[in-house]
Image: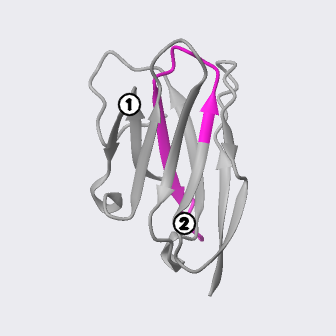
Amino acid sequence: MFFKLLLFPCLGFTLGLEVHQDPSDIIIEGHSPVQIFCSHDKTDFRVMLWYQQTPGHTDMKLIGYLYFKDATMEEEYKEDYKISGDLSGNTAKNGSLMIKKPEQKSSAVYFCAAREKSMRRLSPSLEI
């Protein structure tokens, strides 16, 4: 069985932030894990968010986010997805999203975004 995951970066033009995602698209056969990488150069942006947009829908669902080295996952994604990376230090920021066992329901557009930590506590309804 073949299916395609489409991956697009979410860019922060107003802040001069460019977020890079790699690879841009993947065609998968079988159920081997898939890893999507995201990076940016804004050293004070210590939050990396991952979103999923499923075919036929305009809304994006938050999969989870990385804050420094700590990942927080939305409940419905905890079993099948993993977020990791290191947003500490004063160098380029790198993170990844792993789809542990891709299935047809994994076929979607995935977005990576970055932001500064706000003064209020991050919550599951976090928006970019």
Q: Residues within 10 Å of mark 2 (few under 14, many from 20)?
A: some
Q: Kindly identify which residue carries mark 1.
A: 69
Which residue appears farthest toward the bottom when viewing the image? 1
Question: What amino acid is found at the position of numbered circle 2 in the picture?
Answer: Thr
Residue drawn at (38%, 19%) of the image: 118
Report which quarter residue 2 is drawn in: bottom right
Residue 108 shows in the view = yes
* Segment colored magenta: 38-60
Residue 10 locus on image (x, y percent): 64, 40
Q: Nearer the viewer, mark 2 or mark 1?
A: 1
Residue 83 falls left or right of residue 28: left
Q: Kindly identify which residue carries mark 2.
A: 54
Which secondary structure lies at badge 1?
loop
**Distance between the alpha carbons at the discs numbered 2 and 1:** 27 Å
Residue 92 locus on image (x, y percent): 61, 22
Residue drawn at (50%, 71%) of the image: 102
Q: From what the image shows, is residue 20 above or below residue 13?
A: below
Residue drawn at (66%, 55%) of the image: 7
Q: Residues within 10 Å of mark 1 (few under 14, many from 20)?
A: some
Indicate whether residue 43 is drawn in magenta.
yes
Question: What amino acid is found at the position of numbered circle 1 in the picture?
Answer: Lys
Earlier-in-chain disc, 2 versus 1: 2
Foreground residue among 60 and 82: 82
